[in-house]
Image (tube, rainbow, N blue to C red):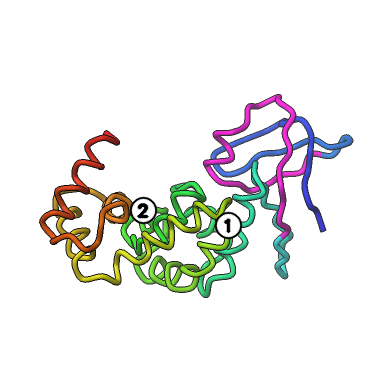
């Protein structure tokens, strides 16, 4: 029904923003990421999704079409409603979420308020293939493919487990390991991955 709203920001709180268009202010529920992108009294465009319930019409708005796409992907997952989808997108940017899903990083997704391990596992299971097609470029899709493959090779999977024991997140470890030759020994994979991780600090 609404593709987007463009207007002056007249109100914002921790969970929503109101955009005035032609004398009418539309209140949009949104993520922390979008709220960080906008300033009060500025003119913004929010890409919207109208959620229809028996007792309410809720309008959700996002600063990018990419974040809106991920919101729609999330609410398409069994058991994930708009509130949980917003919580996930408030904790992770769409790019980081795609990485978490590809690497199977349940822990990172459960950092979202009200999202438990079962929901996080369902998000990973149902969106693993869609994550690759929802990224912004073919290069990103190829990178996610490599990261996803890390968990399927015993040596690289073991290397990721070792790196997470050293305090790195599963996502960080999977990204580093995906850049290393998987034919190396586990010990050499860990060494090379640690070099990559140390350069990012």
Q: Is residue 25 left or right of residue 108?
A: right
Q: Measured along the vertical axis of the image, is residue 76 above or below residue 181?
A: below
Q: Is residue 119 left or right of residue 176?
A: right
Question: Residue 166 in magenta?
Answer: no
For the C terminus, the image quarter is: top left
Q: Secondary structure at mark 1?
A: helix
In the rendered structure, find residue 70 and report the number of the disc placed on it.
1
User: Which of the two residues, 147 or 37, is positioned nearer the viewer here?
Assistant: 147
Q: Tell me where the magenta segment starts and ends, as one range.
A: 25-50
Q: Earlier in the sequence, mark 1 or mark 2?
A: 1
Identity of the residue drawn at 44% across and 48% down: 91
Pointer 1 local density, CA inside 10 Å: few below 14, some 14–19, many at least 20: many
Q: Position of residue 74 (x, y in %)?
A: 55, 63
Q: Residues within 10 Å of mark 2 (few under 14, many from 20)?
A: some
Q: Nearer the viewer, residue 125 or 111?
A: 125
The residue that appears at 43% across and 63% down in the rendered structure is 145
The image quarter in which residue 106 lies: bottom left
Instruction: Quickly name the residue at label 2.
Output: 111
Q: Is residue 194 above or below residue 187?
A: above
Q: Position of residue 186 (x, y in %)?
A: 14, 61
Identify the residue shown where x is 29% and y is 36%.
200
Where residue 175 sits in the image (x, y, percent)? 33, 52
Asked if residue 49 lies in the magenta stretch, the reply is yes
């Amino acid at each position: 029904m609404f593709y987007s709203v463009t207007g002056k920001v007249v109100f914002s709180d921790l969970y929503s923003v109101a955009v005035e268009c032609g004398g009418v202010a539309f209140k949009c529920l949104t993520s922390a990421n979008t709220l960080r992108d906008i300033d009060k009294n500025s003119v913004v465009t929010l890409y919207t999704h109208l959620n229809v319930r028996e007792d309410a019409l809720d309008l959700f708005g996002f600063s990018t079409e990419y974040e809106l796409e991920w919101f729609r992907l999330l609410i398409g997952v069994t058991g994930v409603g708009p509130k949980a989808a917003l919580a996930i997108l408030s904790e992770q940017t769409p790019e980081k979420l795609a990485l978490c899903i590809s690497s199977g990083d349940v822990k990172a997704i459960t950092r979202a308020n009200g999202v438990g391990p079962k929901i996080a596992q369902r998000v990973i299971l149902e969106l693993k293939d869609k994550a690759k097609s929802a990224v912004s470029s073919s290069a990103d899709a190829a990178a996610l493919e490599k990261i996803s493959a890390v968990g399927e090779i015993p040596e690289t999977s073991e290397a990721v487990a070792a790196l997470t024991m050293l305090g790195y997140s599963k996502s960080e470890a999977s990204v580093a390991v995906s850049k290393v030759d998987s034919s190396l020994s586990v010990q050499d994979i860990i060494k090379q991955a640690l070099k990559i991780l140390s350069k990012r600090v």
